[in-house]
Image (cartoon, grey):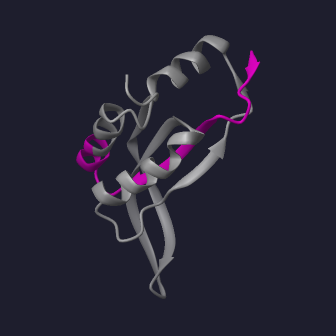
Amino acid sequence: MVRSGGRIRIVLVTCGSRIEARRIARKLVEARLAACVNIVSAPVESIYRWKGKLETAREFLLVIKTAASRLGALEKEIKKLHSYEVPEFLVLSVSAGSADYLKWLGESVKVGE
């Protein structure tokens, strides 16, 4: 196990449909904005307040693995691709992980390769 040095991030995004989740995930990996995107294929139930009303929705969770340096471009792309007016975009820091996995992740999101 090796410390990530603060370079690796996990981003959580929810989508309104499995089709939308797959489309966004594929585009993010193709654009090298994410090394990998997991789609939680069983819907999650979300309860939230939106425009003053209590809402409930079935959503699909994306778990996006990326580098801190790609966060700005990643957020911009998600806003462009997503059907929600305000898509979820929560960033979690990764303190450590497998040296081989962290190396692969970093190489997978390098620009120009």
- Splitting the image into 4 quarters, where does residue 58 fall? bottom left
Residue visible at 28% across and 39% down? 27
Residue 21: x %, y % from top left = 32, 46
- Residue 21 included in the magenta stretch of the image: yes
Image: 1 above or below 28: above
Image: 101 above or below 94: above
Residue 91: x %, y % from top left = 59, 50
Residue visible at 52% across and 47% down? 71
Image quadrant where one finds the C terminus: top left
What residue span does the magenta drawing correspond to? 1-23
Residue 92: x %, y % from top left = 64, 45
Nearer the observer, 94 or 5: 5
Residue visible at 48% across and 62% down? 46
Nearer the observer, 67 or 48: 67
Image quadrant where one finds the N terminus: top right
Residue at the front extreme?
112
The answer to whether residue 69 of the structure is visible from this angle is yes
Residue at the bottom extreme?
52
- Residue 93 included in the magenta stretch of the image: no
Q: How many marks?
A: 0
- Splitting the image into 4 quarters, where does residue 84 fall? bottom left
Image: 45 above or below 69: below
The answer to whether residue 59 of the structure is visible from this angle is no
Residue visible at 43% across and 29% down? 36
